[in-house]
Amino acid sequence: MDFDPSFAERSLPFDHDEVAEVAPLPKGRIPSYMADHRRRLRERFLSGGADAMPDYELLELLLFRAIPRRDVKPLARRLIDAFGDLNRVLAAPAPRLSEIEGVGPAVLCEIKVAEAVAHRMARARVISRPVLSGWEPLLDYCRTVMAHRDTEQFRVLFLDRRNVLIADEAQGRGTVDHVPVYPREVVKRALELNASALILVHNHPSGDPTPSQADITMTAQIEAAARALGLVLHDHLVIGKSRETSFRADGLL
């Protein structure tokens, strides 16, 4: 097959268990040991699924298309070492990914496409469906989209009279520990969408979902503004790395 040189990645060093040097190959061919390794990974994935594979091997499968003629295991391991796990690799900002040796435009594209697909699939499970009767899919969606971000993001889920999710919008993005939120803009957008109820969601990049005093104050302001216009604030979820906090469950709302 033809190989577009514009998508070529930087040359990668091999791990100690890989062949140290590979002689130049005819266009479109890869070493037999590499082809065998790729075939075995694909077969293992198809027979055992993702549970049968560690994160770096799943990442290898993603990288095969981006780097068709080089060993991708060292890069996969390098990415996992840099970010911690596969979720954090997919969620990492493009500039940070690009700092990793071996990450070029093709690799960056594959990673971000995988992240977008994961978000779309999680969102499809909750959009246009009654939220309050399917809370776990909603939490899964929030975790997928927000748990591994390295900056705070504030989202509002807008519900209709039947508590069906009609819109999910990011209202603000901030720093590692702050995101600006304007209650008037939140309720204004709810009226534009003809929403009847809201669920607030934001993440704590520190990993600890314990609400800050600023979170509590801001939530009270939004609840007051919503109530004045006949809107219901069902909950405010704070998403951490491995768990979340519900204002409603903790008696804060």
Image (cartoon, helix red, strand yellow):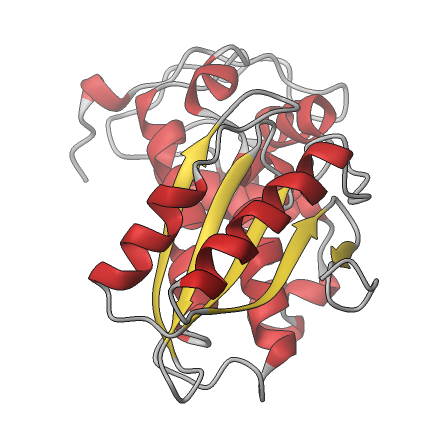
The residue furthest front is 228
Residue 25 lies left or right of residue 78; in this view the side is: left
At 37% across and 85% down in the image, what residue appears?
161
Quadrant the N terminus occupies: top left
So how many labels did they put on this image? 0
At 62% across and 55% down in the image, what residue appears?
143
Residue 152 x, y percent position in the rendering: 57, 32
Look at the image and tell me whether residue 41 can be seen: no
Residue 48 x, y percent position in the rendering: 67, 72
At 33% across and 34% down in the image, what residue appears?
109
Residue 149 lies left or right of residue 95; in this view the side is: right
Establish if 15 lies above or below 106: above
Residue 193 x, y percent position in the rendering: 24, 65
Quadrant the C terminus occupies: bottom right
Look at the image and tell me whether residue 253 can be seen: yes
User: In which quadrant of the rendered view does residue 251 lie?
Assistant: bottom right
Residue 170 lies left or right of residue 132; in this view the side is: left
At 42% across and 11% down in the image, what residue appears?
10
Viewer-proximal residue among 176 and 28: 176
Establish if 150 lies above or below 50: above
Viewer-proximal residue among 197 and 169: 197
Establish if 3 lies above or below 32: above
Viewer-proximal residue among 3 and 199: 199
Viewer-proximal residue among 108 and 147: 147
User: In which quadrant of the rendered view does residue 2 lie?
Assistant: top left
